[in-house]
Structures are given as structure tokens and as C-alpha cells.
């Protein structure tokens, strides 16, 4: 076939294949145009999930009648005029393809009026065939109607999903927009009935800054667990909210990233977020966040995807490190017992206990060992025991900040140990329950990391080298990775084809099961292979070491030991979760406990 120029209608339909995937794509393009026009209120009317009708009204600046034919022609836009404008584009739209592409696959009508015009104007487009501009009564702003989407492209229309599914995609995109633009009121109706409304907030009202819009869009549970993030440096600013590790998701359905106000997906930033949560998130779970990254528009290319879903950073590695360090430090401050001053709603950063509908099962057993702490021990006695624990120490640590005038520390004072697993502590406002193994595991892990980061791990030589039976492959790995094992505090030599001689161990873990510990470390080395990969997985190895060094379940602790553990939790970073992401503590307020027993009713 000879080379020929394609007709404009076919060109627009090809472009529509890139820009218009489903009704949600149309809503996205039209609403972004409204925002670029300065709209403060946008009404979206839908029928049959947007397939039958999409109508978007705004109160923006409007257009003069003479520009309506240009608005539905390809590559015509008021937003850029030169290459310099394209490289520093700050508007949501800029390609000039959205309206002609949409109009080519629908029955399209655009009506507009500027505030000073005597009347409005309208232009119909039917399947790409442009009509004539005609006067039309219209309030200031613009209305775009898109009827019978894909009526002239049946192959595309048959790929649309059910009405409920298409509506869900529209609502999800509007949710994403509502998070980014709390200053704009959004009203949605479906099949003639009001569906959703996001009221506008001004900065003076608090709005997004107090988490009201978070509650509207992502739910009150997210808002209660949200930590405020705001950090600037290297010409970058990252702000928004990240959910505490106790609030995690089975899927990535609450992960929102905005670059200069534009909702995008970026693998580098997503990887940085996962790395920041690596130490505190339960396996298989996904973090939740709403993050806004701001930088010079020249440093980011937004013209890399037809639908503008992706961007390309000029300094991708810098962006990755900036996001990782910002979130890593924010999560490091989530200590057990800390008040949620940075939470969206000022709610304490504690794991709220889940109450089963069937009620609360309780069991009580009398002490069976003399060493077990009696249940009637009071807070005053616990405070005295805690003071006595540190009275004889020269390096006595500072007492933790009390959370109110009562002088009781955030995690209170221990009163009992339950089944040798949980520490029960009386706090100023209720009951604290601590999983002692999980808490001690986190404390040991953070100590190992700090020691390794500062001066390296101290080792303790064994009086008699310990023979460890291993497989021949593990013995080979121990020889190959001797330097790596030394960095982790082990001095190991080969004692035979299937045996090792252990000569020194990490001092912090000398009292643990060092033989089992060494086998676990070797298993991790075998899994990760090369030594460079092992260094990259250092935290994972240190986590294994800390798990072995943590106090075991059913070990009876004295009151001073329990209180010492509580104080260490209050001073340890990320102590709200163990190394595997499980919660280490739960808080039950007095009103909660009163409700269990129907007190006051």
C-alpha cells in the first residue's frame, strides 16, 4: 500500500486509544481541564457508570466563543507555547489531545461563558464531526457533555466492564483528586441521584492539614493512624501522611503519590517507601500513604506517558534516597507509648485493640510459683521497684517523660505477668498489655543496628571453641564468607568437612543459643549468595540474631525486670512493632474497660 495521510477523524480515534481507556479516563481529563481553568467547584453527573453520560460542570474562567473550534482540534492548547514551557510545565493538562480524542469517540458538547460575556456559547461534535458554534444560555464557567462513549467504536465499547465497575474506577480517581485538592468542592451524581460530595476546605479551616479530608476519602481509621510528614532539603519537599505500621493493607489500594500536584505512579518512589517500612511491616502487608513530592518542574519530565500516569526524574537516585530517609526517620520515631502529636486527628499512636463481636474471653489463674508477681501489686509499689532497680547504677538513665501531671510514664508501671507471655501494666488512663518477647526482640534489634552502624559489633571470645555440626555446603559458605561473619561478630574456622569451630560470638548475644544462631546466619548467607548481597541484607541478618537473643515466652520476670523493659520500649525507635511487623503492645482505656462491664449504664 502507498504511504498516505490519515484523515483527522482516524487520527483522533487512534489518539483516543491512548488517552481514553474507560469513562474514568474521560472524567480525569475533563476535571483536570476544569482545575487548570481555576475552578473551585466541579459537578460530575454520570449515567450507567459514565458510558451513557458524563457531564462535567465547573465555575472556572471559561473561554471566548472563537476558541471553541480550537479547543476540539488536535495539539491546540493555551498551556504551553514553547519547548521551555514544556520542560517546566506546571498545569495538569498540556498536550491538547484530550478534547478532540474524547469528541472523536462520543457525542460531545462543550458550552462555556466568561464572567464578562453577555451570553454563553456551545459547540457540538458528533463522532469527530465538528458542528457550528451557537449562542447558549450558560453561567460563568464551562460544561462538557460526553454521551454514548465509544458508540462509533464497538470493538472498544465491548471491553468496558459492568456499570458498578466503571463507576468504581471513576470514584477511585475522584478520591485521589480530593486528597490532592481539598480547596475544591466536588459533587458527584449517578443516574440522577447524589452519590458523593467532597466539600471544600480552606487552609484556615485546617482542611487537609488536620486530616478532615483524609477521613472523608480514606476513612477515619486511616486518619487515626496517620503520621504527618513534612521535610525539605536539596531543593525537594516531601509532605503528607504515612500510616503507622499497625495500620497496614492486604493490597496497595491506599497508596497515593503526587508529584507537583499530579497523581502518578513511580517505581523508584514505591521502592523507597517499601524499604522505609521494611523493619516494621508484617510480611505480605502493604503500607498506606498519601505523599506529595514537590520539586522544580525542570527536574521532572511529565511528558513520558500518554495519560500522564508516570513521570521521569532527572535525579532519580536522589529522589529515592530523599524519600527513603524522610520516611525512615519518621517511622523511627514511632516509639511505644508515644502520644500521637503528629497523627492527623491527635489520636494516640497505639494499636487499638480489636473487639470481637462475641465479647471478651477472660481467664484467671492463681499464682503457682513463688517467683510469680501477685496480681494485687499496685502502681506505687511498681514505681518504688523501678526506682530501686536503677538506684545503684552510676549510668542511671533519665526517667521517661510522663504523659500527664500524674508522673506515670507512657507505658505505665508493670503489675503482673500473664501466662509468662504478656506484661500487664497500669497506665495513667487504663491498661497496657505488652508482648514481652516481641518488645525485647525490637530492643535488641535496634541495639545491634546501632552498634553495627557506629563502632561495629563487639565480640566475646569463647573460653573453649565450640564445635558446630553443619552440612558441607554450609561449611563452604562459612569459609567463603568469613569476613562477613566477622562483621557480624562471629569468628569461625573450619574443623572438618562438615564441622565448624566457633571461637567468638557477638557480645550482646553471648548468653543465647549461639549454635542455632550461627546455623540461621549461615542459612541466610546461603539464600542471599554473594557477600555484597549479604551486606545489603544486614538488617535481616541482625533481625534473626535479635530474635534468638530476645527473652523467651514463659520466662518469669520480676517486677523490676518488667519495668526496665517498659522503659526501654519508651526509649527505643520503632518499638511499637517487632522485627517482623507484629505489634508489641496494646492499650485499653478505662472507658473501654468500663464498657466491657456495662459500668455507668
Image (spheres, rainbow, N blue to C red):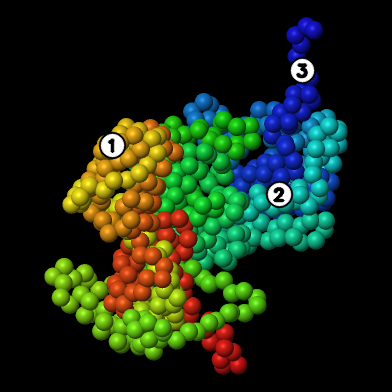
Local secondary structure at mark 2:
helix
Marks 1 and 3, Cα distance to the nearest angstrom? 75 Å
Local secondary structure at mark 3:
loop
Q: Position of residue 34 (x, y in %)?
A: 65, 46
In the foreground, 163 or 74 = 163
Residue 601 visible to the viewer:
yes
Q: Is 566 drawn above or below residue 273 in the view shown?
A: below
- Cβ atoms at labels 1 and 3 below 8 Å apart: no
Disc number for residue 170: 2
Q: Which residue is drawn at 79% across and 47% down?
A: 50
Mark 1 lies on residue? 494
Q: Is 79 drawn above or below residue 242 in the view shown?
A: above
Disc number lying in front (2 or 1): 1
Q: Position of residue 520 (x, y in %)?
A: 39, 47
Mark 3 lies on residue? 6
- Indicate the quadrant containing the C terminus: top left, top right, bottom left or bottom right: bottom right
| Disc 2 crowd, CA 10 A, few/some/many (<14, 14-19, 20+) | many
Amino acid at each position: 500500500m502507498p504511504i498516505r495521510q490519515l484523515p483527522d477523524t482516524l487520527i483522533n480515534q487512534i489518539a483516543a486509544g491512548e488517552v481514553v481507556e474507560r469513562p474514568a479516563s474521560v472524567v480525569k481529563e475533563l476535571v483536570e481541564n476544569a482545575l487548570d481553568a481555576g475552578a473551585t467547584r466541579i459537578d460530575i453527573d454520570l449515567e450507567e457508570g459514565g458510558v451513557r453520560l458524563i457531564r462535567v460542570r465547573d465555575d472556572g474562567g471559561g473561554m471566548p466563543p472563537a476558541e471553541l473550534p480550537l479547543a476540539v482540534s488536535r495539539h491546540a492548547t493555551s498551556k504551553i507555547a514553547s519547548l521551555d514551557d514544556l520542560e517546566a510545565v506546571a498545569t495538569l493538562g498540556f498536550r491538547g489531545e484530550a478534547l478532540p480524542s474524547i469528541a472523536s469517540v462520543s457525542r460531545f458538547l462543550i458550552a462555556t461563558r466568561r464572567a464578562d460575556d453577555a451570553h454563553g456559547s456551545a459547540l457540538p461534535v458528533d463522532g469527530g464531526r465538528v458542528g457550528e458554534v451557537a449562542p447558549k444560555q450558560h453561567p460563568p464557567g464551562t460544561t462538557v457533555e460526553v454521551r454514548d462513549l465509544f458508540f462509533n467504536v464497538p470493538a472498544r465499547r465491548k471491553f468496558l466492564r459492568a456499570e458498578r465497575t466503571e463507576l468504581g474506577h471513576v470514584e477511585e480517581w475522584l478520591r485521589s483528586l480530593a486528597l490532592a485538592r481539598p480547596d475544591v468542592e466536588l459533587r458527584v451524581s449517578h443516574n440522577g441521584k447524589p452519590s458523593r460530595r467532597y466539600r471544600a476546605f480552606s487552609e484556615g479551616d485546617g482542611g487537609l492539614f488536620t486530616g478532615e479530608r483524609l477521613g472523608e476519602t480514606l476513612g477515619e481509621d486511616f486518619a487515626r493512624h496517620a503520621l504527618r510528614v513534612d521535610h525539605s532539603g536539596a531543593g525537594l519537599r516531601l509532605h503528607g501522611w504515612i500510616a503507622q505500621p499497625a495500620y497496614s493493607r492486604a493490597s496497595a489500594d491506599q497508596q497515593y503519590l503526587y508529584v507537583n500536584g499530579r497523581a502518578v505512579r513511580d517505581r523508584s518512589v514505591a521502592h523507597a517507601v517499601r524499604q522505609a517500612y521494611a523493619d516494621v511491616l508484617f510480611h505480605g502487608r502493604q503500607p498506606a500513604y498519601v505523599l506529595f513530592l514537590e520539586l522544580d518542574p525542570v527536574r521532572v519530565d511529565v511528558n513520558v506517558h500518554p495519560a500522564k500516569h508516570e513521570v521521569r526524574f532527572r535525579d532519580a537516585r536522589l529522589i529515592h534516597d530523599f524519600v527513603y530517609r524522610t520516611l525512615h526517620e519518621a517511622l523511627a520515631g514511632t516509639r511505644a507509648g508515644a502520644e500521637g502529636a503528629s497523627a492527623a486527628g491527635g489520636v494516640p499512636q497505639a494499636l487499638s485493640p480489636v473487639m470481637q463481636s462475641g465479647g471478651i474471653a477472660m481467664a484467671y489463674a492463681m499464682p503457682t510459683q513463688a517467683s510469680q508477681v501477685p496480681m494485687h501489686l499496685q502502681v506505687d509499689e511498681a514505681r518504688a521497684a523501678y526506682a530501686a532497680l536503677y538506684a545503684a547504677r552510676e549510668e542511671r538513665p533519665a526517667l521517661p517523660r510522663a504523659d500527664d501531671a500524674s508522673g506515670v510514664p507512657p507505658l505505665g508501671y508493670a503489675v503482673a505477668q500473664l501466662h509468662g507471655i504478656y506484661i500487664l501494666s497500669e497506665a495513667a488512663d487504663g491498661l497496657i498489655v505488652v508482648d514481652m518477647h516481641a518488645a525485647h526482640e525490637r530492643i535488641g534489634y535496634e541495639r545491634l543496628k546501632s552498634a553495627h552502624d557506629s563502632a561495629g559489633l563487639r565480640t566475646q571470645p569463647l573460653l573453649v571453641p565450640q564445635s558446630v555440626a553443619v552440612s558441607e555446603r554450609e561449611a563452604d559458605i562459612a569459609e567463603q564468607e568469613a569476613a562477613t561473619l566477622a562483621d557480624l561478630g562471629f569468628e569461625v574456622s573450619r574443623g572438618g568437612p562438615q564441622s565448624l569451630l566457633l571461637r567468638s560470638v557477638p557480645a550482646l548475644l553471648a548468653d543465647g543459643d549461639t549454635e542455632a544462631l550461627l546455623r540461621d546466619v549461615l542459612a541466610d548467607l546461603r539464600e542471599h549468595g554473594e557477600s555484597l548481597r549479604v551486606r545489603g541484607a544486614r538488617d535481616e541478618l541482625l533481625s534473626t540474631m535479635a530474635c534468638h537473643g530476645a527473652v523467651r515466652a514463659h520466662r518469669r520476670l520480676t517486677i523490676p525486670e518488667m519495668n526496665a523493659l517498659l522503659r526501654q520500649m519508651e526509649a527505643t525507635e520503632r518499638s511499637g512493632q517487632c522485627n517482623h511487623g507484629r505489634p508489641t503492645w496494646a492499650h485499653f482505656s478505662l472507658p473501654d474497660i468500663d464498657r466491657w462491664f456495662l459500668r455507668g449504664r
